[in-house]
Image: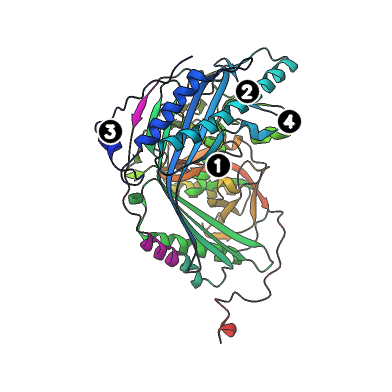
Amino acid sequence: MKRLAVAVLLLTGVSAVLAQPHDTRTSGPSETLLRAMQDEMARTLEHLRLEDLPEPYFLAYTVLETHRLELQGNFGALERPVEADSRRIQVEVRTGSREFDDRHFVGSQGQTYRPVTGVLPVEDDYDVLRAELWALTDKSYKSAVERLTHKTVYRESNNILDVLPDLSEDPVLSSVETLATGPFEREKWEQAIRDISGVFRSFPAIQSSSVDLLWRAQHVYFVDSEGRSYVKPGHWFELRMKGAAQAADGMIQSDYRQLVWSALDHVPPVDALKAEAEQLARDVTALADAPKVETYLGPVLLEGQAAGEFFNQLLASGLANPREVWVEQKWSAQHYKTGALTKRLGLRVIAPIFDVVDDPTRADFRGRPLTGHYKIDEQGIPAQRVQLVERGILRDLLMSRSPTRDRKVSNGHGRGGFYAPATAVIGNLFVTPTTTMSFEKMKRRLREEAKAFGLSHGILIRRIAEERRRSRDELLARPVLVYEVDVETGEERLLRDAVFSAITLRALRDIVAASNEQHVYNLAKPGPFASSATSRASIVHPSVLLSEMELVETERKPSKPPYLKHPFFDTAAKN
């Protein structure tokens, strides 16, 4: 059994950083916490041997050390601010062997597949930290032993002879990367949230709205029994805006913005954020007055964010999590799906005008920050550039440390794994067309193609709802901002209450044109499992024209309008 290797801190000046008084926002990682993690791991691996029970052959600790601030604004007022420091830990104990262990199996109780997590003290008391690590390690070991027993029975009862290894053999790296962040200026941002949320008071059609800010100054600590060790920043600034209005027929019209940055200095000025809120309010107000969509089958032009979500939900999600999980109860399989494209190596998965690369090592694109940038993934494997698609053909997969039949080692994409096992997830996905045209030419081609279909208009979509907002039976979330474009004049008219119909992965192959302008879409990327944490990600992509898509009217039912006017806009109530 391997003993824990002593971590070698490669960055110059790390010892000086560790010697400073601990503050995750300014002084970097805690030497006491790292030492407690390493010492308790070494003790566990050396002494944890129980008669007639399998020994642990792999152990990993991950700690999220966070200073968190949450602010919520509603029509100009601040609600429930929360500020707190925390340390959360994940303990991963594997029993059996690299060739067959307790992972990649979901028994009769699906939650047993989740890692064991808990809370650590925020103070650097070495003995208390060791005690908490010991208790959680014991709990994780017992869970792993039980799961391995059930997995062995499942394999034998189902006569499974061809078994893949459960843990890949990968390079060992130890490093510390710290990123101090200055004071958050809480008073400034409290006022900013009041101002941004107050924008909605100028739009009488808005019935409900909110503006939420989440700021995490965070460092992640990781050690495993094979000798990997890292500390890295995980700072996260997120602004969420919601607005809803109601059409005359009672149908609720809503839209949502989720803006994500990895550093405070990447966040735009408050005036730009207010402008985003104003645009959201205008869009929702216009939707409440727009006519309903009618069934449409023909060419569709996806512009900007709509194209980004199209590539996110069909391509990026289709390439995630290539390793299958054995599931004892078939109903729970829906929570542990593999990417729909991962079994298509060597086949065409997108139109032949595209090459696709994922490169987490890129920090920016033409001067714009990419939030999907990282140097080491959550399993301690260095990030790598991966050529996924060449001329439309799938050539490679994103990999965590879960081997597949076609790929045996990680390429540094194990992510989203704090409350669920780490799986392969994109970092920075570059969708690059080999032939392009101007957006105006694409719009003219939309009109020409629609006319060839015998239609009076084509469809232009500027926003698609985020991945987390799609229903379970949808492959692509609903389009939010849908415009019919007159084939003769090019005039646009906004439509409402549309959903996609009969969307399949073939839509990726139905792309017939791409714009010469590349957009940067920074997002919070959900993992493939229901309990996966979101990961910062970026998609660099063009706008695209599809030869054919179908849109129909939603089956949602209208709601009764409120009996009284909103008090902000009821002049009689104020008098």
Helix, strand or loop status at disc 4: helix
> Upstream in the sequence, badge 1 or badge 3?
3
Give residue 554's position: percent from left, percent from top. Answer: 68, 54
Quarter of the rendering containing residue 38: top left
Give residue 500's position: percent from left, percent from top. Answer: 64, 47
Give residue 118's position: percent from left, percent from top. Answer: 53, 39
Q: Residue most toward the right?
A: 157
Q: Are marks 4 and 2 in contact (CB under 8 Å)?
A: no
Question: Which residue is under mark 2?
Answer: 145
- Along the line of sight, which residue is nearer the eye, 259 or 114? 114
Q: Are marks 1 and 4 in contact (CB under 8 Å)?
A: no
Q: Which residues are magenta?
A: 171-196
Task: Examine the rendered structure and indicate whether residue 443 appears above or below residue 566.
Answer: above
User: Between marks 2 and 3, how big is the CA–CA gap?
Assistant: 38 Å
> Upstream in the sequence, badge 4 or badge 2?
2
Q: Residues within 10 Å of mark 2 (few under 14, many from 20)?
A: many
Q: Are marks 1 and 3 in contact (CB under 8 Å)?
A: no
Helix, strand or loop status at disc 3: helix
User: Between marks 1 and 4, how big is the CA–CA gap?
Assistant: 36 Å
Task: Examine the rendered structure and indicate whether residue 206 appears above or below residue 13.
Answer: below
Q: Residue at x 44, y 18 (%)?
A: 3
Amino acid type, mark 2: Val
Quarter of the rendering containing residue 549: top right
Question: Which residue is under mark 1?
Answer: 546
User: Between marks 2 and 1, how big is the CA–CA gap?
Assistant: 51 Å
User: Between marks 3 and 4, how big is the CA–CA gap?
Assistant: 49 Å
Give residue 99's position: percent from left, percent from top. Answer: 57, 14
Q: Residue most toward the front?
A: 127
Q: Residue at x 61, y 25 (%)?
A: 144
